[in-house]
Image: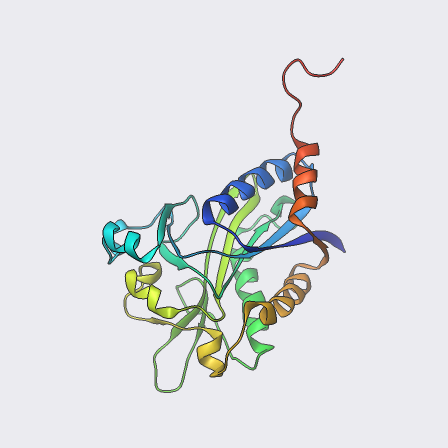
Amino acid sequence: MKPCLVVDLDVIAYGRAFELQRRLVAARKAGAIADVLLLCEHPHVLTLGRNGRREHLRASDHLLQQMGVEFHPTDRGGDLTYHGPGQQVGYPILHLAEIRRDVVWYVRQLEEILIRASADFGVTARREPGLTGVWVDPPGRGPEKLAAIGVHFSRWVSSHGFAYNVSTDLRYFDLIVPCGISDKGVTSLERLLARPIDPAEFRPKLVARFAEVFGFQMEPATLDTLEEQLERAAPAPMGAGS
């Protein structure tokens, strides 16, 4: 089984996580590190994918500032989405050239991981034809989105990933047209289970299903360990050495 580092970043600013992904992608393309799964939560932030539409933002810049919500354009696929406390975000930095060169297959695998992890909590999740992400059908309500997916590739190395609503405050989704889909709702695992749940309870199931679906041997690592590997992988400055 191939090794894959799994690093829990806890709560981290979106911009800092984005920069860490950029460095990891460069190192993974160079073959200097193994595949990595970053897990984290973000403070309140809206992110706009490269194909997104700014008009899907329903709030003014002033309101976002008052609410303490950041706004970040990104290079991932997809439209506008929200990240915040209680949401389990995963950023796999994988070299698909060593697994399978198929972007659609990769997205379906991410969906499969989240569907299986949902089933571990007794929740039946599914795909929605023609759409990306993971969906559920709560009694008396239409289809609702439980997890969003948006990815980016550089020379077959993945970045960005998925955002699964564990105990997310769903009111923040009112600030946007989530993923550009106006006729379907958004939900969370906590709402579906009708009990409090923390991302720390969900995380082990997620990691186990990630390993299962991709065939990885997951190896826990710290951010400090990852930083040390990135330091070693960084090219030496011009003129350095003997």
Circle count: 0
Say which quarter of the image contains residue 56.
bottom left
Rendering coords of residue 162 (x, y %): 50, 58
State whether residue 161 is above or below residue 146.
above
Position of the N terminus, as image quadrant, is bottom right
Q: Please tell me which residue is depicted at 53% across the width and 75% down the height of the picture.
A: 197
Rendering coords of residue 176 (x, y %): 29, 60
Q: Please tell me which residue is depicted at 50% across the width and 75% down the height of the picture.
A: 125
Q: Is residue 224 left or right of residue 154?
A: right
State whether residue 28 is above or below residue 92.
above
Position of the C terminus, as image quadrant, is top right
Q: Is residue 131 left or right of residue 226?
A: left
State whether residue 173 is above or below residue 196.
above
Q: Please tell me which residue is depicted at 37% across the width and 46% down the height of the picture.
A: 72
Task: Looking at the picture, tell me which residue is in the foreground, 110 or 42.
Answer: 42
Rendering coords of residue 55 (x, y %): 23, 53
Q: Residue furthest front?
A: 66
Q: Please tell me which residue is depicted at 28% across the width and 55% down the height of the picture.
A: 66
Task: Report the coloring of the rendering.
Answer: rainbow
Task: Looking at the picture, tell me which residue is in the foreground, 83 or 139.
Answer: 83
Task: Looking at the picture, tell me which residue is in the foreground, 62 or 234.
Answer: 62
Say which quarter of the image contains residue 191.
bottom left
Rendering coords of residue 158 (x, y %): 55, 47
